[in-house]
Image (spheres, helix red, strand yellow):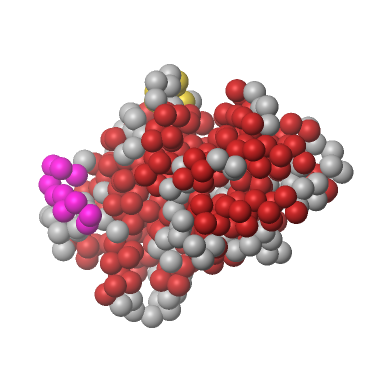
Amino acid sequence: MGLMLDLRQIVFVLSDALDLVGVDDVAHGKRVAYMAHRIGTSAGLGPHELDDGIHAGLFHDCGVSSTREHRDLTAGLDWGGEEAHCIRGETLVSSFAPLARLAPVIRWHHTHASTLSRLDAPAPLLRLANLIYLADRVDALVAAAPEPDPLLAAARIRTLIAENRGTRFMPDLVDAFQDESSREAFWLTLEPRALGPWLGSLLRNRPLHPMSPADLKSLASVLATIVDAKSPFTAEHSHRVSAVARHLALELGMDPVRVALIEVAALLHDLGKLRVPDAILDKPAPLAVAERIRITRHAFDTWRILSRIQGFDEVAGWAAHHHEWVSGGGYPFGLSGDALGPEARLIAVADVFQALRQDRPYRHPMDPAQSMFHVDRMVAQGHLDGDIAGLLHRNLPDYAAAADGA
């Protein structure tokens, strides 16, 4: 299996997913990537280093799933709890081979320059980590400023960064920042209407290259880990749905390529839940109408993100259609019948069965028989595919074990 995909586009998608964590503060990673590129250019970084700066800027916060942690990270220069998400991010990036070399950058992107100088690590990576730290803190200061226009906050931010020259930030990077930020365009490009075209220019006319099955699955696993870490009640949910879906696909006799892509789609099916506030996912009581609507939109957000990847349309649909009903009436597109292929129907069954086997804030996990009672009821209501659900009955202990992570 080899899909023709663009690595930078893939990283942009990861950045889109991470943007959802802030709920209201979107495009943080993209702004950091933009500023890192501008400052890095002024500091004399070469083309490959600038590329690494863009990639590191886009996914530097991949260790953040919680909206609470995101709010803490965008308040001031430091808050004392930064290291945890840096360590998580390092682990995640290390597992994605095409960008694993940037793991140290993610690990140290909140570390002061005075500390970096004592670390036993390649100097270019430490410099890149400090560049991301500088750009990240500038964006946090812009977000925290009382003025809506970044130009109004520019002088104060420039002064604050200068005061940390040689302590938090490397002197040459501060000098490059002062040079770039002296121009109004540096600040005005942070606004969405200007940032979008700049980002688009980075993707234009880039060659596609095949991704191996291992790389594609490792990327999906990184995203699934970020999603599943958002709430203690969804720990390993995406990975276990993928395991159940794999078993179902094999029993249906699907070819290895399709089975692998179904695994990837199942890993990514809840990507849009990163936009749901933690308090809703963890609420130990029935949801209010507005709260339920916030959760309902997650399937559309999954589709919106994944469908942006050129050549990934079919897999994006399988992932996003897991709440559609075979008889119609599901969400977000109201599909039914032949419009729902076997892949999406299969992931829907795997998602329901696994969720019933997990603890939730409003109920305890169900045993296999109870879980199948509810699955069968949803089949009778026209929600789930009866033929696919019937496979669970044939090998219930094995499917229960897969749903439990065994």
Above or below 329: residue 183: above
Q: Quadrant of residue 46?
A: top right
Above or below 391: residue 291: below
Q: Residue at x 74, y 46 (%)?
A: 169
Q: Residue at x 34, y 30 (%)?
A: 310
| Viewer-nearest residue: 371 or 24 | 24
Q: Quadrant of residue 373?
A: bottom left
Q: Magenta segment, which residues? A: 331-340
- The percent coordinates of residue 245 (x first, y second) are 37, 46
Does 299 lie within the magenta span?
Answer: no
- The percent coordinates of residue 251 (x first, y second) are 33, 40
Does 335 lie within the magenta span?
Answer: yes
Secondary structure mostly seen in the magenta stretch: loop
Q: Residue at x 61, y 30 (%)?
A: 41
| Viewer-nearest residue: 377 or 28 | 28
Q: Quadrant of residue 253?
A: top left
Residue 22 shows up from this direction: yes
| Viewer-nearest residue: 83 or 48 | 48
Residue 239 shows up from this direction: no
